[in-house]
Image (spheres, helix red, strand yellow):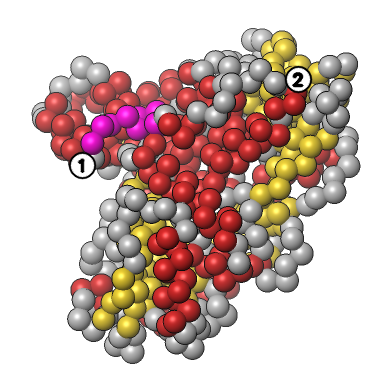
């Protein structure tokens, strides 16, 4: 499962599909294509999900607010996918109820009710409870809100560990024979006869080469650069970078519910429970014209998010309460919309090449909820070049660790019983992150000593070794920020100690 060491095999031979980009779209396509019997190679210039795919709002959702922009097809597809993904990975995706305090100066109640009715019925909802109206002066969900917000609504969506979703797709791709190359940058591509010659530069500076019958550009914010700068082609499409920033603070309300807050500029922010005792607040949706690598939250965004909280909550956090913040760029398909919040979250494909030439398929836009359908559609576009490719399959098979059978709570209870002599909070953490793979991680462990060195919180050496051997983790941030969120629960000294251990 571990990636081949750079330089040990500089020529990767001939594959059917070479994918540039190790975010959610590239990972989803790699999984789908490998499971259909295609020979696949994927390269990523950094760590997997290091860009947009680990800096999302961490929701699998239909996009309630997109109904205002008449994105009915996109919302329907996303709502259908919400059910598919919830069934495929119940360890990293789970239902969440969202409370929407009514703010009549933003949207009238009839409009909100209509939107929620459509949201309940567009996607054939089966697993999640429907929306309902709330008297916030009487229900516990209204207790933390200011008294002027006496009416509200509640609806369902799902939470997702976004970076782990990427990794699980890559694990499944590798199980089906895909070559997975982290920290390997695509530097040049050209057609040579019936295939592409793709040149990649590994982290140690050695050149890697692969020939591919088709090339897929899933580079996200860098999609146009790959088309023009790597492949030397022209593109009729572009992405529009929209910056989304989040802050993390200690959780400041009781109960498992999240909140969706409308602002005076008609944008909305989510206030979600996060990592047990924390809250994740965002996002900001502002235009961004800098380098994607340099994106960072600024003081104006922090003030914006905290200002909305003050408007709605009786006791809201201050800037001193922020324990973490992150910012990402969303590479949205540029539909020339004047309002960044109104830019479509749909996706567009651009295919370079006739049926007599090896194709390059470039992906513009998309969102995490619809990544699996995007992968199916992308491979459908390549069907003329691969007429013997087998049919779509990912809707019917769980992601790695997702084959728990029954409920997650029942699975977690069984795992805790099997490892009764271990700290139960640690066993539950393994159940949540790894699902049935937790049994591979724990193996014959029967005591805390079997978990190895303790780095702080729920983080032990046994998990670090497992991540290094099975999930391509090599640097401290891979372990602490993307494969897990341990970094949020360790002191600075503990994080430094782990980095020294590596």
Q: Which residues are the magenta region?
A: 398-406
Predominant SS along the magenta part: loop
Quadrant including the C terminus: top left
x and y percentages locating residue 235 in the rendered image: 85, 45
261 up-or-down from 222: above or below: below
Q: CA distance from mark 2 to mark 1?
A: 45 Å
In the shown orientation, is residue 355 left or right of residue 53? right
x and y percentages locating residue 438 in the rendered image: 29, 28
Mark yes or no: residue 357 visible: yes
In the shown orientation, is residue 412 left or right of residue 492? left
Kindly state the secondary structure of the residue where label 2 is placed: strand
Residue at the spot of label 1? 409
Residue at the spot of label 2? 213
Checking the image for residue 294, the label placed there is none
Q: Name which residue lies at 72% across and 67% down.
A: 337
Q: Nearer the viewer, residue 208 or 102?
A: 102
Task: Check contact, mark 2 vs mark 1: CB within 8 A.
Answer: no
Q: Nearer the viewer, residue 260 or 134?
A: 134
């Amino acid at each position: 499962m571990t990636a081949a060491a750079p330089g040990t095999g500089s020529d990767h031979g001939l594959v059917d599909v070479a994918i540039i980009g190790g975010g959610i779209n590239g990972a989803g396509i790699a999984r789908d294509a490998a499971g259909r019997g295609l020979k696949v190679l994927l390269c990523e210039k950094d760590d997997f999900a290091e860009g947009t795919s680990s800096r999302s709002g961490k929701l699998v959702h239909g996009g309630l607010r997109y109904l205002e922009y008449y994105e009915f097809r996109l919302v329907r597809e996303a709502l259908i996918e919400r059910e598919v993904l919830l069934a495929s990975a119940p360890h990293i995706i789970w239902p969440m109820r969202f409370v929407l305090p009514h703010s009549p100066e933003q949207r009238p109640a009839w409009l909100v009710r209509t939107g929620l009715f459509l949201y309940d019925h567009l996607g054939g909802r089966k697993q999640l409870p429907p929306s309902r109206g709330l008297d916030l002066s009487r229900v516990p969900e209204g207790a933390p809100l200011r008294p002027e917000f006496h009416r509200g609504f509640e609806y369902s969506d799902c939470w997702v560990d976004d970076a782990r979703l990427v990794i699980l797709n890559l694990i499944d791709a590798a199980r089906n024979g895909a070559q997975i190359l982290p920290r390997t940058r695509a530097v040049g591509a050209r057609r040579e006869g019936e295939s592409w010659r793709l040149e990649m530069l590994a982290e140690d500076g050695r050149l890697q080469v692969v020939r591919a019958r088709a090339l897929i550009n899933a580079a996200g914010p860098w999609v146009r650069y790959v088309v023009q700068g790597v492949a030397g082609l022209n593109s009729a499409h572009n992405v529009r970078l929209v910056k989304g920033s989040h802050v993390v603070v200690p959780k400041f309300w009781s109960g498992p519910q999240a909140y969706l807050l409308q602002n005076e500029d008609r944008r909305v922010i989510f206030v979600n429970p996060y990592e047990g005792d924390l809250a994740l607040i965002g996002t900001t949706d502002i235009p961004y014209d800098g380098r994607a690598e340099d994106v960072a939250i600024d003081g104006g965004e922090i003030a914006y998010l905290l200002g909305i909280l003050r408007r709605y909550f009786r006791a809201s956090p201050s800037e001193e309460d922020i324990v973490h913040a992150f910012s990402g760029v969303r590479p949205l398909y540029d539909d020339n919309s004047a309002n960044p919040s109104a830019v479509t979250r749909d996706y567009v494909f651009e295919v370079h090449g006739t049926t007599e030439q090896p194709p390059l398929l470039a992906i513009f836009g998309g969102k995490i909820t619809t990544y699996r359908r995007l992968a199916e559609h992308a491979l459908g576009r390549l069907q003329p070049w691969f007429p013997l490719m087998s049919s779509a399959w990912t809707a019917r098979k769980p992601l790695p660790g997702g084959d728990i059978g029954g409920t997650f709570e029942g699975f977690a209870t069984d795992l805790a019983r099997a490892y009764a002599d271990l700290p139960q909070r640690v066993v539950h953490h393994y159940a949540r992150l790894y699902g049935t793979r937790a049994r591979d991680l724990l193996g014959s462990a029967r005591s805390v000593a079997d978990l190895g060195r303790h780095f702080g919180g729920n983080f032990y050496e046994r998990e670090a070794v497992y991540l290094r051997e099975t999930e391509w983790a090599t640097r401290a941030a891979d372990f602490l920020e993307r494969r897990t969120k341990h970094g949020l629960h360790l002191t600075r000294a503990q994080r430094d100690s782990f980095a020294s251990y590596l």
